[in-house]
Amino acid sequence: MAKLYATINSAEGPITLERTSPSAPWTPAGETAVDLVRTGASTFSLVRNGRSHRVLVLKEDKESGTVRLRIGAHTYTVQVQDDRSRLMQTLGLDKTALKVKEIKAPMPGMVLNILVKPGDAVKKNDPILVLEAMKMENLIKAPGDAVVATIHAEKGKPVEKGQLLVSFA
């Protein structure tokens, strides 16, 4: 029997979801199966414990394992984990991601704008600088959470592929 763990709106403990086969819907452990039918691109009809609900998927982020749902007038943020990711979190291994040390130019181009300065804390996917290459502007983003140590590129100056642009502390 496969299991998932769903934490709703950052609640204290997760709800254990189970399913008996790969095509069966996920159901809270110990409950009878729910009736879940897709009614549109991001809408579902859910019948649980004899009550019918319309479910709208507002946003799905597969990278973080979260889904924002609207059921009736209420919005829920659900984080879903499998056994492996739950174990990694329990052991604290989810926080030991590799530290980002630097960003290098992915292609030759011209630095149009630098959007950070030394000492700035950046999160994954935050914009770092704008690089013009082949008459297109490319937004270079932070590959992970870090603090900017040194800016090696200069606004208005050309860079070569692989040239160091930014170092992180």
Image (tube, grey):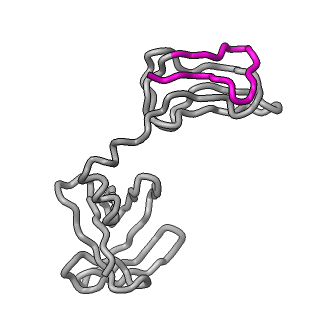
* Residue range corresponding to the magenta coloring: 150-169
Residue drawn 28% across the image and 52% down it? 89
Q: Is residue 114 magenta?
A: no
Instruction: Determine if residue 133 is in view.
Output: yes
Residue 63 image point, x, y percent: 46, 53
The answer to whether residue 75 of the structure is visible from this angle is no
* Residue 52 on image: x %, y %: 31, 79
Q: Position of residue 115 (x, y in %)?
A: 57, 21
33 or 111, which is in the foreground? 111
Q: Which residue is at the front of the view, 101 or 55? A: 101
Give the number of callouts: 0
Q: What residue lies at 49% left-to-right and 67% top-to-bottom? A: 42
Q: Quadrant of residue 82?
A: bottom left
Q: 30 above or below 137?
A: below
- Magenta stretch holds residue 163: yes
In the displayed structure, would residue 12 be above or below residue 115? below
Quarter holding the N terminus? bottom left
